[in-house]
Amino acid sequence: MRSPRPHSHSNARTSSVLSTRRDVLRALGGVAGVVTSGCIGRLERSVTGGKQRSVAELDPEYTEASFGSYVDQMRERYDDHGVWGTEKGPTGTERLSLVGAWSDNWTLRKPRTPSDNGRQIRIPIDYAAVLYRVSGSDDQQSQSQTHHLWMWAGADPKQSKKGYGGTTVVELSVAVALEGTGTLTAHIPKTSVGPEDAPVQVQLSGSDTLGPAAPLHIPAGRIQPAPDGTNVGPNGTFDLDWTGAHGSPVSVAGVCELQRPPDREFELTLSCEASGSQGTL
């Protein structure tokens, strides 16, 4: 699913790192995500899947205005689990300029079989990324330009529509991999956070705190960087996971700092994966 691009040896390493934990989940049929939530039961059906896309800094899908329309759509669909969490927009962007944004969607599904009594796992999923440039980081004396990348994914198991009742999201992740075009220097969240910490203010910290920042609602489960898929440094990766057991909309969001030489442009791989189940929890 995260196959390397032929010209990029660094991306081959990245693909291997990001897929390790996913292979374990597939082998377990998604059960790992449920066990971590503390809700152990008989899972009748489960499925794991994902999608990825490559994006280039010079080829944004959205302008600032058009991305605002997308944010409104996601807020209508996910409510407090939209792109900017419980808010309509980010804070701390006074010294940031939006370079571009990208989004994608897919459906985690497992078709019905004769033994399923008419039930089907079907979970619509959206994910997006927004890239900002930090003002003042691109002057002539600077050896690098600093950017902040916001990542988000939302899943809606459609508990009460068209016979999809009993469907539970057990894992949702969003990830970014740099393809030889820069360095990942920081990321938030850094540690595991859960409902007792919510709302979590997702914002890079430091002496000169900048956004984008937004509060993240966590109704269940835990959000944490995947240790086998998060690497700070050149050609870095940031893989942010939610694991739990939840039958209503849920989201995951994080932000990371990226740096690159002034004469280069970012090329990134965005990934989103999820697991869902039906059964007795």
Image (cartoon, rainbow, N blue to C red):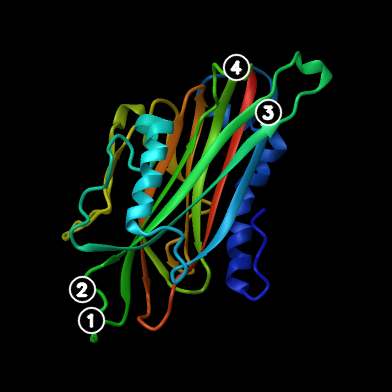
* Vertical arrangement, residue 177 with respect to residue 192, above or below: below
Q: CA distance from mark 2 to mark 1?
A: 6 Å
Lower position in the chain sequence, tag 3 or tag 2: 3
In the foreground, 86 or 58: 58
Residue that appears at 62% across and 18% down: 162
Question: What crowding class fits label 1: few (fewer than 14 Cα within 10 Å), some (14-19), or many (20 or more)?
Answer: few
Q: Which residue is mark 2?
A: 136
Residue that appears at 44% across and 72% down: 58
Tell me if label 3 and label 2 are in contact, CB under 8 Å: no
Amino acid carrying label 3: it is Ser
Question: What crowding class fits label 4: few (fewer than 14 Cα within 10 Å), some (14-19), or many (20 or more)?
Answer: some
Q: Is residue 209 left or right of residue 114?
A: left
Q: CA distance from mark 4 to mark 3?
A: 12 Å
Q: Which residue is mark 3?
A: 46
Residue that appears at 57% across and 24% down: 168
Secondary structure of the residue carrying tag 1 is: loop
Amino acid carrying label 1: it is Asp
Lower position in the chain sequence, tag 1 or tag 4: 1
Q: Report x, y in % for residue 118.
A: 74, 16
Q: CA distance from mark 1 to mark 4?
A: 55 Å
Q: Nearer the viewer, mark 4 or mark 3?
A: 4
Amino acid carrying label 2: it is Gly
Lower position in the chain sequence, tag 4 or tag 3: 3
Q: Which residue is mark 4?
A: 166
Q: Which residue is mark 1?
A: 139
Tell me if label 2 and label 1 are in contact, CB under 8 Å: yes
In the foreground, 133 or 180: 133
**Residue placed furthest toward the right:** 114
